[in-house]
Image: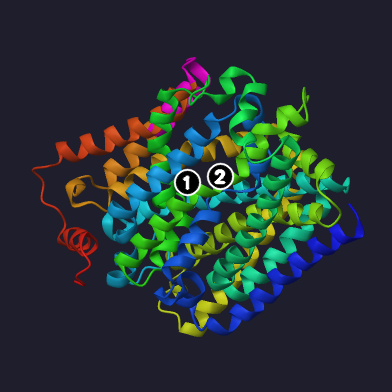
């Protein structure tokens, strides 16, 4: 790392802090802090949804998959997410916005107390918060590893630098700081990715090498499906990402909740889906070409970082590193803001009555304290990641296992067709999905496609089946009213 590279990284972090304090003026209460007062422009929500949907893992773990398996990474990851988000634009995204319009919700789990009951809401909220604590901590650790690869500095430095900057801007500016830093991070990431793309293309002989480079790579690298990423894997993975990117991942649901109308939420989702069709192509092409430039790497996950160090001139290495920071910081800060909303709106009022009916100023103070505390704890976990050893990886694995089953009652619970699926159906479906995860992970040796998809599919089948068994039972009028309210843009 040259001085100019460090300067680029420093300017990036300074810009994040400045944006955070600029957003401070827009925040007057918890509704501004958590959901932008329901005034988030569709294009900004779309960009934030897009960059909040992936972290620096794309440039590390997915770079490794692109190196070893080729084009299939675009098919099973980017193309599948794009299809899921665009489909969700028509059937899911508007429902989140309508929840805010009709019920003034500020967190994705807030409506669950009406749809099911308070115990079900608390179970899902606590599971999400505790697992996210370790999930975000692991993402900070990943940032530290990236900085270590580029500079040799201790991993703790990368965690503290990026974490403290994020802690400042997200605590001060809430979701407004989050989405505007997402915008800045999107620009930085795009500039860095385009520069890398152009340099790699020139090195290989021009832009025509996009098509000719495949002859220098293993034949299977140009195939749509490459074991273990088969067509069946893509089929099952689609259901997982449909749930995740349409609200099962709570920070992404918040982008829709913050939209002014259901129509605006739909537009933001379509825009995010289109970005998933286009942007990954620019990012992945250098990764696909990496085996030609850096053959026989022992650790393919380092391919992108090593190419940046070898190919980019002074100053641009820092820009690429800033882009990698941006990808992860976008996800971690939006996670912190959304989890703080769940704690402030859904958990604290149940624990102590004094947190109910707070004034606008009081709710904003609690929101900032909660955000600061949650983010601080994730940094501690990130710094102590080595001491967790395999435990941290285990927790992250369980987070991935739970996010799908928890998403089933969260998302399907918004559709009138499933009105008879009650709290027992919700809890049983989560447990059934968790049981399938344990079965496929530790008991039976099934293909990767079934390991990924079966927990979600079983959870969905149980949720729907229990609703059918309850179809002759009367539905609570409050639940019926909620389902009608989110089913159309007419305010109830």
Residue 406, by quadrant, is top left
Q: Nearer the viewer, residue 227 or 190?
A: 190
Which of these two is toward me, 63 or 486? 63
Left or right for 452, reference 179:
left
45 magenta-colored: no
For mark 2, what is the residue? 280
Q: How is the image coloured?
A: rainbow
Position in image of residue 242 (x %, y %): 39, 43
Quick one: which residue is furthest to the right in this view?
Answer: 3
Please tell me whether mark 2 sits on a helix, a strand or a loop: helix
Residue at (55% x, 30% y) in the render: 71
Proximity of marks 1 and 2: CB atoms separated by less than 8 Å: yes
Q: In the structure shown, which secondary structural element does the residue marked by tag 1 occupy?
A: helix
Q: Is residue 375 above or below residue 16?
A: above
Which numbered dot is residue 277? 1
**Crowding at mark 2 (Cα within 10 Å: few <14, some 14-19, many 20+):** some
Residue 283 is situated, as x and y percent measured from the top left of the image, at: 62, 44
Residue 53 image offset from top left, x and y in percent:
52, 51
Q: Provide residue 370's location: percent of width, then percent of height.
A: 58, 67
Give the main secondary structure of the magenta stretch.
helix
Could you tell whether 196 is left or right of 446 in the image?
A: right
**Magenta segment boundaries in residue numbering:** 433-447
- In this rendering, is residue 87 above or below 362? above
């Amino acid at each position: 790392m040259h001085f100019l590279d460090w300067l680029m990284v420093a300017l990036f972090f300074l810009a994040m802090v400045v944006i955070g304090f600029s957003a401070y003026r827009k925040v007057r209460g918890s509704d501004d802090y958590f959901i932008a007062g329901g005034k988030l422009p569709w294009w900004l929500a779309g960009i934030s949804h897009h960059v909040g949907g992936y972290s620096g893992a794309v440039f590390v773990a997915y770079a490794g998959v692109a190196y070893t398996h080729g084009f299939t990474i675009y098919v099973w990851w980017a193309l599948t997410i794009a299809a899921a988000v665009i489909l969700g634009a028509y059937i899911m995204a508007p429902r989140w916005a309508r929840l805010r319009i009709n019920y003034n919700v500020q967190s994705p789990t807030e409506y669950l107390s009406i749809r099911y009951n308070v115990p079900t809401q608390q179970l899902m909220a606590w599971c999400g918060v505790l697992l996210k604590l370790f999930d975000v901590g692991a993402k900070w650790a990943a940032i530290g590893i990236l900085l270590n690869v580029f500079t040799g500095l201790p991993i703790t430095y990368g965690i503290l630098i990026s974490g403290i900057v994020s802690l400042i801007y997200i605590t001060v500016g809430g979701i407004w700081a989050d989405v505007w830093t997402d915008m800045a991070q999107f620009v930085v990431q795009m500039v860095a990715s385009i520069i890398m793309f152009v340099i790699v293309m020139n090195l290989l002989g021009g832009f025509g090498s996009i098509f000719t480079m495949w002859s220098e790579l293993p034949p299977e690298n140009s195939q749509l499906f490459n074991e273990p990423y088969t067509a069946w894997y893509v089929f099952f993975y689609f259901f997982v990402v449909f749930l995740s990117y349409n609200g099962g991942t709570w920070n992404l649901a918040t982008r829709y909740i913050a939209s002014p109308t259901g129509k605006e939420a739909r537009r933001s989702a379509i825009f995010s889906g289109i970005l998933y069709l286009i942007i990954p192509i620019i990012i992945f092409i250098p990764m696909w070409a990496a085996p030609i430039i850096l053959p026989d790497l022992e650790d393919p996950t380092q391919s992108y970082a090593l190419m940046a160090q070898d190919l980019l001139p002074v100053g641009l290495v820092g820009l690429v590193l800033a882009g990698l920071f941006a990808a992860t910081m976008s996800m971690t800060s939006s996670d912190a803001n959304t989890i703080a909303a769940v704690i402030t709106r859904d958990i604290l009022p149940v624990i102590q009555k004094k947190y109910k009916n707070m004034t606008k100023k009081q709710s904003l103070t609690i929101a900032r304290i909660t955000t600061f505390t949650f983010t601080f704890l994730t940094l501690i976990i990130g710094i102590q990641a080595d001491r967790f050893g395999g435990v941290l990886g285990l927790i992250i694995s369980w987070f991935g296992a739970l996010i799908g089953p928890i998403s089933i009652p969260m998302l399907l619970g918004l559709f009138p067709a499933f009105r008879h699926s009650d709290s027992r159906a919700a809890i049983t479906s989560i447990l059934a999905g968790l049981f399938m995860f344990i079965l496929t992970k530790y008991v039976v040796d099934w293909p990767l496609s079934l390991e990924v998809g079966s927990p979600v599919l079983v959870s969905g089948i149980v949720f729907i089946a229990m609703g059918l068994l309850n179809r002759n039972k009367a539905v609570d009028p409050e639940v019926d009213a909620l389902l009608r309210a989110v089913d159309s843009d007419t305010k109830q």
